[in-house]
Image: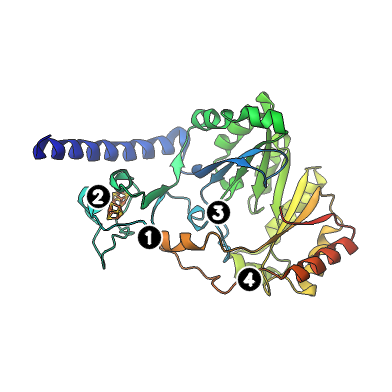
């Protein structure tokens, strides 16, 4: 193939990508809307409820937890991720970027954050998978098609679907209700993994279609909560009480980070609050640093570099404190 022909194909491809971005944007403003972007659909998950489940991670969350394992899920907009360890410095991305914004720096080709509109063109041309788009728009039909591929596993294992994030309860409600109603009609169990920070009217709408809420508590002290997540805990705790009164099945989860929410006082405050709720169980989730490398890929600062999980001995002590309040407690998901 001649050089000019290759150039023509590349140009046509870039024009097609540009058209697709604007078309997708148009669709999102119309029937798909600006949110409900998805960062990952994880198959064969066994930690998000009963049986084998398919977990959908939505993009966008009102909280900014300093230990967040999925920093790419915090913003509601699509974004490019760049893995410098996979980059060979070939420069193809810089040649094809329609914004002409990718500039070589010390042999690397970072994402031009001020210009990038996440058109995904550079990822298409990168032979080393060093670039990846976080946030894909799925219509309801496309998402259901993906979820239905695993229906055999749901049936055989007593599993189902878990909607997670980011924060599910702040996504577009018509979209969410469409998915929930279709799953309900087909007999698929749906769990919602939530930080609890959304208007209660949203919880009321989804309640009849949700099997279990996987609900997080992070800190009982409002100021501390604000410091660690960016927002206070009033709405989260009030929604939890209301959901409990409405008879929702609730599986509580507490991420534990040594020194941040693991003192006797922190745990006793939580136990005092939880003891009056009717919950399925309480899971104690140890801090882990698995998502830390993602911060660099998305050019975000990781505040939790010194965070640690509590020791196994401390975890057992924490479990005992909750059990003294007759709260069914488990270490791990
Ligand atoms: S195309 Fe991929 S490997 Fe080549 S410079 Fe760009 S990111 Fe690096
Ligand atoms: S995703 Fe961003 S960096 Fe990549 S080609 Fe498009 S505008 Fe350029």
**Residue 298 visible in image:** no
**Element under label 2?**
loop
| Spot occupied by residue 224 in the image (x, y as percentages of width and height) | 66, 71
The CA distance from mark 1 to mark 3 is 28 Å
Q: Which residue is mark 3?
A: 61
Q: Nearer the viewer, mark 4 or mark 1?
A: 1
| Spot occupied by residue 211 in the image (x, y as percentages of width and height) | 73, 38
Q: Is residue 118 above or below residue 65?
A: above
**Element under label 1?**
loop
Q: Earlier in the sequence, mark 2 or mark 1?
A: 1
* Horizontal relation, residue 199 to residue 237: left or right: left
Foreground: 308 or 265?
308
Q: Residue at the location (42% across, 38% down)?
A: 29
Q: Nearer the viewer, mark 2 or mark 3?
A: 2
Quadrant of the image occupied by residue 191: top right
Q: Nearer the viewer, mark 4 or mark 3?
A: 4
The CA distance from mark 4 to mark 1 is 25 Å
Tag shown at residue 85:
1
**Element under label 4?**
loop
Q: Residues within 10 Å of mark 4 (few under 14, many from 20)?
A: some
Tag shown at residue 196:
none
Foreground: 207 or 253?
253
Kindly tell me whether mark 2's CB lies below 8 Å from ligand 2.
Answer: yes
Q: Earlier in the sequence, mark 2 or mark 4?
A: 2
Quadrant of the image occupied by residue 85: bottom left
Tag shown at residue 308:
4
**Element under label 3?**
loop
| Spot occupied by residue 303 in the image (x, y as percentages of width and height) | 53, 71
The CA distance from mark 2 to mark 1 is 20 Å
Q: Residue at the location (28% across, 59% down)?
A: 109
* Horizontal relation, residue 134 to residue 227: left or right: left
Q: Nearer the viewer, mark 2 or mark 1?
A: 1
């Amino acid at each position: 193939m001649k050089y000019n022909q290759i150039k023509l194909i590349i140009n046509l491809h870039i024009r097609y990508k540009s058209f697709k971005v604007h078309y997708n944007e148009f669709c999102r403003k119309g029937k798909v809307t600006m949110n409900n972007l998805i960062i990952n659909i994880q198959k064969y998950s066994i930690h998000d409820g009963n049986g084998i489940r398919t977990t959908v991670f939505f993009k966008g969350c009102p909280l900014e937890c300093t230990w967040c394992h999925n920093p790419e899920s915090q913003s509601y907009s699509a974004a490019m991720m760049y893995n410098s360890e996979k980059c060979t410095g070939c420069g193809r991305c810089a040649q094809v970027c329609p914004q002409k914004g990718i500039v070589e720096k010390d042999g690397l080709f970072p994402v031009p954050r001020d210009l990038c509109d996440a058109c995904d063109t550079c990822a298409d041309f990168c032979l080393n998978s060093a670039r990846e788009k976080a946030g894909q728009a799925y219509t309801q039909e496309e998402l259901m098609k993906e979820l239905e591929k695993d229906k055999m596993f749901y049936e055989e294992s007593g599993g189902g679907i878990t909607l997670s994030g980011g924060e599910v309860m702040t996504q577009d409600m018509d979209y969410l209700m469409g998915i929930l109603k279709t799953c309900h009609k087909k007999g698929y169990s749906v769990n919602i993994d939530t930080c609890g920070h959304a208007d209660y009217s949203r919880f009321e709408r989804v309640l009849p279609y949700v099997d279990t809420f996987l609900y997080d508590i992070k800190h009982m002290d409002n100021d501390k909560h604000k410091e660690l997540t960016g927002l206070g805990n009033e709405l989260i705790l009030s929604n939890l009480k209301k959901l409990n009164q409405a008879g929702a099945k609730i599986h509580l989860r507490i991420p534990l980070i040594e020194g941040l929410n693991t003192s006797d006082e922190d745990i006793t405050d939580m136990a005092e609050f939880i003891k009056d709720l009717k919950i399925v169980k309480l899971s104690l989730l140890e801090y882990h640093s698995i998502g830390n490398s993602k911060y660099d890929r998305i050019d975000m600062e990781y505040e939790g570099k010194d965070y640690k999980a509590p020791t196994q001995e401390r975890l057992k002590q924490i479990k005992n404190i909750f059990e003294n309040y007759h709260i069914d407690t488990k270490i791990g998901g």
